[in-house]
Each structure stands twice: as structure tokens, then as C-alpha cells.
Amino acid sequence: MKAEHPRFPAGADSLIKKHLTPKVYAALSGKKTAAGFTLDAAIRSGLENPDSSIGIYIGDKDAYPLFEKVLAPIIREYHKLEADPFHTRVHRDDFSPVSLPAPDPEGSFILSTRIRVARNLNSLPFCPHMTAQERVVLEKKTRDALLQLPKDLAGRYISFTDLGPENYDALVAQKLAFAKGDRFQEAAGLNRDFPTARGVFLSRDKGFRVWVNEEDHLRIMALSTNADLSAVFNRLAKGLAHLSACLKFAFDPGLGFLSSCPTNIGTAMRAGVHIRLPKLDRQRDRLKEIVARHHLQIRGTGGEKTAVDEAVFDISNALRLGVSANQTVRDLHAGLLEIITLEKNL
Ligand code: ARG
């Protein structure tokens, strides 16, 4: 029996709605990866959440080539690519250290800096398609690798499995643990068996952290409460180099590091700051113009899909494929300099 092309609600404006034509759906809907992941599972979040901007999540590395017909146009549009990432080596890898002057030396605007990368193991399905047992296997492998981190990054791993709701809530309130996924992630299967085998690694000074079993197997991040982008990037690069030597990550020469969301492939990096801009807050069009020109994005104070409170913007790179990690940080730096100069002069 032929499956019927899904009907996206009239108001929906997602990339999956745009690119999943009846013809493409008919070509792909009967396919399944070796791990059993299907197109219907991939698009569930976009169907249940008409306000999705992308609307597709990927359940294992083999789903990328299998669903190329629908993924290629989505990836090209999101990452603003000219070349076809499935058949051209588009990914550029460069985690060499940067040394940029601090963009806000007096700390008048930037409240914090955070850079993260997503990584997924080659050997397991991705988070939307994992069983509880597979999540436990991932947690064990990761914990072993984290135990061997160099001294300055060493710390402790806290598993949510046995934490108990009170201790877990306290960690979330301190922003040390990640919360259960939102409705987009829920529909993608990311909350299955929560909180089993989820957890966070915190270095002693908390400036290097790893989230385990959130939207991706690993979210590896460095952060600080100042504007020293270079120090944050270099610390991340060091921790990442160690983990990459211990674990085998899913990677494709065209698509870069694979991730459960096609927005997060490539460098899989999001480098951003929280920045207070009271004047530009009242002239948001001017801020938006600079942000667009530098290929940056604005998120709300509380993260993705939240509002901007008290003029505190989360500004970060939007593109992750076709631009190296090193270049991404330089571009963010250039954009921030322009934003801060304008804010000062208004
Ligand atoms: N699935 C959501 C949407 O399509 C989020 C996409 C990007 N964010 C993410 N965390 N993967 O709007």
C-alpha cells in the first residue's frame, strides 16, 4: 500500500513542508535504514508542530544518504550553500587556536560567551532513535573518555539517572543541567526514557562542560562570564581534541559532523554571547541588518524560541557548513565589534 503524502497545516512555513513534495515523499516513504529509521519518524516533529522552522530530525547516520532527496534542498537553503553538500567536499575543518582582541574589554555589553559543538558516535543510532539501553552504552563510553581529560579540564560527571527529581531540579535552576526537551524535541522522540542516561560533565571551574544524551549524543562546550572569545574557543578545541581521540564521531566529507538536526551539521558549532544592548533594543531593525549581513542569528535571553528580556540578546553564528570553526569565531568577532560600535554611538 502506498503511504499518503502528509498534509502540513496551511499556516506552516517549515523547510520540510516546502521541500517534501508528493513526488519526493512517494520516493522515500517506503525506505528504512538498517537501524529501522523511517521518513515518517523524521518528519513527525514538523507535522505536529506547524510553527517549526525546519521540521525534520534524523535518527541515524545512514538516514542522511537515504533521505538525500529531501535533505539536500533543506541543507542547502538553511546553510546558504551553492555547492551540493552530498557530492562535494563542503565541510572545512579548522580548530586551530585563535587570538583575537577581546571585543568588549571593559565588559560593558557582553555578559557571557559560550561555544558548543554537537558530536555523535558512529556506532549508535542518534538520540531521536535510541533505546534506553543504547543511551546507557553511550553514557558509559563518554564517561570513560571524560575521566581521562587533561588536568585543567578534569571534573565530575553527574548522571541524571539516579539524581532524584529534587537534586535534578536544583541543578537545572543553577543552569548546570539541561531541561527535558521542548515540544519539538518531544515529538522527535528525544524525551523517550528521560532522564535515563542523560547527564552533564562539569570541569572543576565549570568552564568546560559536556551534555550527554540531549538532542545529540554529546554537546561539548566551553563558556565564560566575560567576552574573551579566543580563550573560550581555544579551551573548547583542547577538550574536543581529547574526546575525538577517544571516541569515533559520525562524519561525512561533504556534510561534516552529522547531527540529529540538519541545522547542526558541518562544524556543528554554535558560538555566541549574551549581550545587553539597550539602545539597539529600541532600533531592532538596525540590529537585524548587521546580524543578517554577518550571517548571525538572534535568540531570546532564555535560549531558542524565547523572548528577549531586558535588552539581553543571544547572538550567535547561524551557518555551520562550508565555513570552518576558526572562521566562524572570527566572523562572530567582526559582527560583535560592529554591533558594539553602533550601540556606543547611538
Ligand atoms: N525543530 C525545530 C524547528 O524546526 C528546531 C530546529 C533547530 N533547532 C534545534 N535545536 N535543532 O523549528
Image (tube, rainbow, N blue to C red):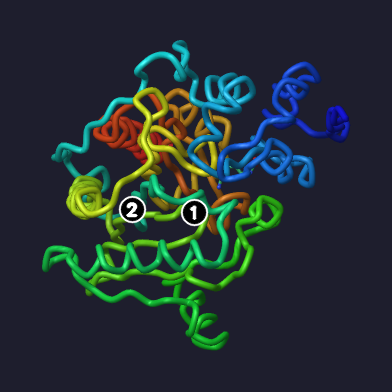
Whether label 1 touches label 2, CB < 8 Å = no
Q: Which mark is residue 312?
A: 1
Q: Secondary structure at mark 2?
A: strand
Task: Check the image and report above or below for 102 versus 147.
Answer: above
Asked if ligand 1 lies within 8 A of label 2, the reply is: no
71 sits left or right of 187 in the view: left
* 190 in relation to 91, above or below: below
Quadrant assignment, res 296: top left
State left or right for residue 151 relative to residue 300. left
Ligand number 1: quarter of image = top right
| Quarter of the image with the C terminus in it | top left
Residue 130 image point, x, y percent: 56, 56
Q: Which residue is mark 2?
A: 113
Label 1 within 8 A of ligand 1 by Cβ: no
Relative to 13, does residue 237 appear above or below in the rendering? Answer: below
Q: Give residue 192's position: percent from left, percent from top.
A: 63, 63
Instruction: Work out which quarter of the rendered image holds the N terminus and state it.
Output: top right
Q: Which SS class for mark 1?
A: strand
The residue sitting at 40% across, 43% down in the picture is 270
Tag 2: residue type? Thr
Amino acid on which the number 1 mark rests in the picture = Val
Q: Quadrant of residue 212?
A: bottom left
Say which residue appears at 42% left-offset and 53% top-offset: 274
In percent of width and height, residue 175 lies at 45, 70
Please say if 102 is above or below 133.
Answer: above
Residue 233 spot, x, y in % from top left: 24, 47
Q: Earlier in the sequence, mark 1 or mark 2?
A: 2
For discs 1 and 2, the disc positioned in front in the rendered view: 2
The disc label shown at residue 146, or none:
none
